[in-house]
Every structure is written in C-alpha cells, then in structure tokens.
Amino acid sequence: MTHPVINPDVSPAQAETARVSVRRLIVMTRIPEAGRVKTRLIPALGPEGAAALHAALLRRTLHIANRHSQQSAVDLEVRFTGGTTTSADEFPTEHVGHWREQQGTDLGGRMHRAIETAFVEGARHVLVIGTDCPDLSPDALGDAWSQLERHAVVLGPAADGGYYLIGLNRPDVRLFLEIDWGTERVLGQTMDRCRDLGVSVGLLPTLTDIDEAENLVFCRRTGEEFDDCLPREQKGLLSIVIPTLNEVGQLEATLKPIMQHPNCEVIIADGSSTDGTVDLAQRLGCRVVTANRGRGRQMNAGAALSRGEHLMFLHADTRLPNTFFEEIHATLKTGAIAGAFRFQIDQPGWGSRCVEWGTNLRCRFLQLPYGDQGLFLRSSDFFRLGGFQNWPLMEDFELCQRLRSHGQIRLTPSASSTSARRWKKLGLFRTTLINQLCIAGFRMGVSPERLARWYASLGGQTSDRRQRGRFFGFLSLVIASVLLLAAPFVYLAQVDTSPSSTATQHRETLERMMDENRREFPGADEVDVAKVVELIRQERCVLVDVRTEAERKVSIIPGAISQAEYERTIGQHVGKVVVCYCTIGYRSAKYAQAMKQRGVSMSSFNGSLIAWCQAGHKLTTLDGRDTTRVHVHGPKWNLLPPEYQAVR
C-alpha cells in the first residue's frame, strides 16, 4: 500500500488541518536506501544489510506508534527525508499516519518545523520520536504524555548521550539551536538549554538507540522482527566470540583446535588491529566483525551477529580443552544459567598454582569467573539480559553479577589454559594485586573507564623506573600473598552486597511489609502467590486490580480487571474466588476487609505485584502485551528483581 506524501509547497492550512485529537505524535525517519542509512553499521552488515535493519526498525516504530495512536486518540504523522516520493510509496509497510517530507537544513531545524506546524494545525501537546530504538513501547509514549501534564519539556534519554523522544507543550526554536547533533553531548546541551530558559523537564527511562554494531544485541531479543537482517539462531551450534586487538601472535594456536569442530562458528570481533590479525582470522575461516574498540563493545558486536544456540566468549590467548564442546552442553543441561572453564595459567611454579587455586575457589563459591575462563551461556539468555555493558573493563564481572541473580554459574571439570604473558610482563603477584584492586575499585564505584586508564598506565616500566619497580614488586608480593590467603573470606563477606543477597534482602523486606498488612487489617482474608497461581490455573479466580488507572496502564497481572469493572459486574462472578491486589498488599487488604464488612467474599493477595514479580511471573499491559515494567511509589517499594523495571 502506498503512503500519501504531502507536497512541501502546500501550506499547513491546506494540508488536512482537521484533527481528532490535540495530541500529535511525530515520527522522524529516513527512507531506507542502501548506503544512505545506518552508515556506521555498514562495516558489520554491509550497505544492503544496514538498509534492511533501518527498514525493520522503521516498521517496528510505525507499528508501535500506530497502535498507540489508535488506543489513545493521538494523531500520527510521519516526517521522512531521503529518497524520492516514489521510494516512499514503495516502502513495504502498512499505511499508517500522515506522511510528509521533512523541511529544514539540519536535524534540529527539521524537528522544529514539524513541531511548529503541528501547533499551527491545532495540536496542544506534541511528541517527536525517531526510529532507532527497538525498546520503545506504547507504555513509554503513555508515560511521556503524562509527564507533559506536569512539565514543559519531556526527554527520553538515549544511552549514547542523545535522546530518542522529545515532548513539548509549545514550540520553542531555542531548544534546537547550537546543538551538536549526532554527538554524545545532545542530551546534556538540551538539558542546559532548558535550565537557562527556566522550563521544567521530565525524564523517561534511558533506552538504547541502534547506531553501532554493539547495539544490535537489543534487536536480537525482540523476536522475529529482525530475522531478515540479522542472523537466525541455529540449534546445536556453538558461537565462539573472540575480541581481538593485535593478537596475530596468539590467535592461531587458539583457533586451530576450535576450527576443526563441525558445530562451531568462530566470530572475531576486531577493534581495528594493525598487525595482520584480521587477515589471519579470515585465512583460518573465521568470520570477522569490525567493532568499536573495547572488550564489552567488541563482544556485544560479535554476539549480535552470531547464529549459535549457545555463546562462548573467549580471549585470544586462552586455549580450550579438547572436550570443550561436550562440557559446555553438559554444563548447561544441568540447568545452570552459565558456565566457565576452570582457571589455569600456562606457566610452571608454585606461584601460578596459588593464583589458580584462589581463582577457582572464588569461582566455585562466588560464581564470578574471570573473562579469560571462557564464559558460556545460552544465546537467548544473553540477549534477554542485554549482553555486556559497553565498557573497556569489568564488563565480564558485571555480567556475571547479573547472571548469578538468575541462576548458577558452574565450572566445567576441565580447565582452559591462559597465556602467562600478562603475569610475565608485570609479575605474578603484581598482576594479581592489580586485578583485585580493579574489583575493589569497581565495587566502591570507580568508573570502568577510569579503571581502564589506570590499568593501562601499569602496562610496563621504562629502564629509569626499574628500581622503583623492584620495590613495588616486593610490596605487591606481600600484599598479593595476603589477598590470596584471605580471598575466600573476603569474597564471602562481599556476598552480602551481591545481587543474590539483594534478592534475599528484598524478600525479607516484603515479608515484614506483609506482616504489617496483617496487623493493620486483621479482618481481611488473604492468599499467597502460590495460591493465586493455582487458582488461575484452575480458572476459578477473578483478579481485581485496586490500583489507580495510571498504575494499571504500566502493567497488570494477566487477566485482571479494575475495581470499577468488578463492582459494575459483581453479579457475574458468583461461584468464583475473588482475589484483589495492589502493589504490596496494603490497599488490597483494606479493600478486602471493607468488602467483607459489606458481605462480599474476597481475599487480598498479600505481597501483591511485588510478590508476583519476585516469583518470576509475567506481567502484561492492558492490551495484553508482555512487559517487565512495574509502577512503584518510591524506593521503599522497589523490591523488584533486576529483570523488572520500576516506574514512578
């Protein structure tokens, strides 16, 4: 179906000025032309692949925007640039919204012209979105309209320093002047401009735009929408992702045993090597993905273009045992969320054995393997959790923290052998000390970027520093020895701050709140989460959500009805078990006790939505779409597991 395109010479007054709603949602996009869109992704996807990805993102955004406009009485307008009227007409998507060509010299000018025209045509509130954010949802758009009722400007921050959404209650060209479009300074400059103008700003949750290869992991978790432009999962295949930067001297010994296995693909995620690493990898039959430098970015980029049912992340100087494939599958079949190989250094001596012993003890008790132990997991879990942080250091440590809150990270019976080159360069105990200081600094809040700079500064010594180096080496020996001996106790003590410990604390806090609900409303009958699940399974339950409409718009337990709907249809629920819920159980207990006094049989779901989420059950929006967002009223009530997102 073709898209109607307004001639840019036609005045706004002549161009469909009759509108149903005072709200206008504007989608800013480009026509998907190979070589003209997603140019930063061309090295990874090629011109046609990058254009196909842009088209998939555009289709997804239009579908979300169209659904939102139909449900919320919002006028939808698409502002396009690039291509021709013919190419816009031929774009393969459903006819949604009102299509117009963008006008203006830069992005800021084009957005302002679109916004200004919308207000001229009668709109009183305007949202502008791009098409680069796969996590954008109708819920986020609903939140933006709500924020516009309290703020003059609403911004949706993007992880790269820009914004994926801007909302206004009146046009103001000053918000778009002298902004460094396309840089990480866009959001900060816009916030500064709002402050200078004295206007209030509402902020939405931060989401990720798809501009670089490492961002593609967010497309892989959305289902089949990107199957035409990104690889499809192949059952039984193991994808091994190796981040490289000038590793020509190490890579061949690592790759040769792996390349002989028929059910493995090897992806080299290269950070612009200059020593022949890429040529060697291609000659050995690997796929090479060019990525932005930094281990987290490189591994995300490689994983996003993988086809394997399982993923493993391997350092270029780590050698796998011959039984690696069988051990990976056996470990994951036990139900573990992830696994790693036992740690081994390819250097003789008691010092190396001490480091190995301490590392393996740490992994066994704390489930925090190092990145050079060959971390592996199911690709579906990797994409669901959003992959690595795009950090230059500590990205593997942080991912393991998240993984162990979802299950166990187990060690294989065999060990992978890691090159001793780092230990030889800096010294065995000095290297160990540096590793431990990085972990300690990270736990104390030092940024990964700062840690990476500090780590790089310790990479070597010049001749005029050797004397100080000897003293430092001796001091490192003493401190590292103490750390190795104390490692099990130190890390066990740190478990209290781990994600799994946080989950325990959240459950204990919820139990205390549930006890308070019982004391406050002793006359209310109650059920727990297990009973609710059983009643739903038996189709004997009527779930009544007693929260406000704004809270219910964020998420509900599937199938729940509102308090108003229940009271309007109360006679239709005779013979069913009526269970009411809220966020934590206070309001539901109050309502259940009041209804009991009126002679209506009803139970309160004690713990309510928080207990439901802690048990790992799914939520939906009012229109039945799965979501992980939960409305909470403040930090006190944010007792959610990490896979759920608190909304206030």
Image (cartoon, rainbow, N blue to C red):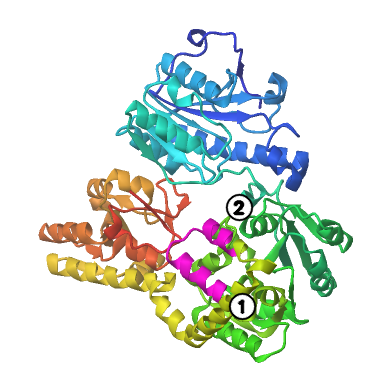
Residue at numbered disc 1: 470
Which residue is depicted at the point 61% across and 49% down? 215
As rendered, which of 439 and 308 lies closer to the eye? 439
Q: Is residue 181 left or right of residue 503?
A: right
Q: Residue 339's spot in the image, x, y percent? A: 61, 76
Res. 396 in view: yes
Q: Residue 586's spot in the image, x, y percent? A: 21, 60
Circle on res. 318: none
Q: Is residue 460 magenta?
A: no
Q: Is residue 584 left or right of residue 142?
A: left
In this rendering, the label closer to the viewer, 2 or 1: 1
The segment highlighted magenta reads 433-455
Helix, strand or loop for disc 1: helix
Residue at numbered disc 2: 223
Q: Along the polypeptide, which appears first: circle 2 or circle 1?
A: 2
As rendered, which of 407 and 267 lies closer to the eye? 267
Dot 1, how many residues are within 10 Å of its Cα: few (below 14), some (14-19), or many (20+)?
few
Q: How many marks?
A: 2
As rendered, which of 5 and 348 lies closer to the eye? 348
